[in-house]
């Protein structure tokens, strides 16, 4: 399964993927053959992935975003193939997006290459620009990893983390730095 994670960085490095990898490395999934226990929580990740653009999406009108997805579904703009090449479909999606969000500049924050390792520019956001609507499954902060649920060995159990990123940052007094959207697989 894929999970949405936000990783905190104190500063903005030249290579975001490498910085995220260094932070996530201690949490890589491994199996202890001696004890039969699993450790860590990920076996693969990319910056952005399925959640690429979420920092931008959470700043936009949710009813318009919902309408955009509905239009794309109705017009089958998420489908590619010989008769509907990807570039043509992307152009049509952008056209529909701009009808709802005139004046929007940059890549539309949806329907991106989910396997691009280093993500897109808006997959990194300064803490001061985090939307109160941003939620995630896992939040990695300095000296702390918060999961919405944890595996107990028999099933998943909810934790005290409700997924609301901005509220959690404020509770911990974190007002500077950056968040990077990560799609990890377990």
Image: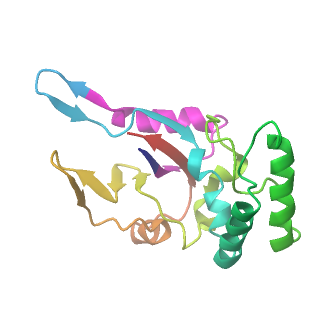
Foreground of the two, 176 or 30: 30
Relative to residue 155, is residue 37 depicted above or below? above
Q: Quadrant of the N terminus?
A: top left
Residue 161 placed where, x, y %? 33, 65
Q: What residue do we see at 53% from left, 46% from top?
A: 182
Which residue: 63% across, 39% down?
A: 13
The answer to whether 123 is drawn above or below residue 61 in the figure is above
**Residue furthest front in the image:** 83
- In the rendered picture of this protein, how many numbered marks are placed on residues? 0
Q: Nearer the viewer, residue 162 or 24?
A: 162
Inspect this view and state whether residue 150 appears.
yes
Location of residue 130 with respect to 32 vertically, above or below: below
Q: Going 73% across and 61% down the picture, which residue do you hit?
A: 72
Can you name the residue that lies furthest to the left here?
35
Residue 104 shows in this picture: no
Q: Which quadrant is the C terminus positioned in?
A: top left
Q: Is residue 10 left or right of residue 12?
A: left
x and y percentages locating residue 150 in the rendered image = 26, 52
Front residue of this view, candidates 143 and 83: 83
Q: Is residue 1 left or right of residue 19?
A: left
Q: Which residues are magenta?
A: 4-30
User: Is residue 81 toward the left or the right of residue 158 in the image?
Assistant: right
Q: Position of residue 45 (x, y in %)?
A: 50, 37
What kind of colouring is applied to the model shown? Answer: rainbow
């Amino acid at each position: 399964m894929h999970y949405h994670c936000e990783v905190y960085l104190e500063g903005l490095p030249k290579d975001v993927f490498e910085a995220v990898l260094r932070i996530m490395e201690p949490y890589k999934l491994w199996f202890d053959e001696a004890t039969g226990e699993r450790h860590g929580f990920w076996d693969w990740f990319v910056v952005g992935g399925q959640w690429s653009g979420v920092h931008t999406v959470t700043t936009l009108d949710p009813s318009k975003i919902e309408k955009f997805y509905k239009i794309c579904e109705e017009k089958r703009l998420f489908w590619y193939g010989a008769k509907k090449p990807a570039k043509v479909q992307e152009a049509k999606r952008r056209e529909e997006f701009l009808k709802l969000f005139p004046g929007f500049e940059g890549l539309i924050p949806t329907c991106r290459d989910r396997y691009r390792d280093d993500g897109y520019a808006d997959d990194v956001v300064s803490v001061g620009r985090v939307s109160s609507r941003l939620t995630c499954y896992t939040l990695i902060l300095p000296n702390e990893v918060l999961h919405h649920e944890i595996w107990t060995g028999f099933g998943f159990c909810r934790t005290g983390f409700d997924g609301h990123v901005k509220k959690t940052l404020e509770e911990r007094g974190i007002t500077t730095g950056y968040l990077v959207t990560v799609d990890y697989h377990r």
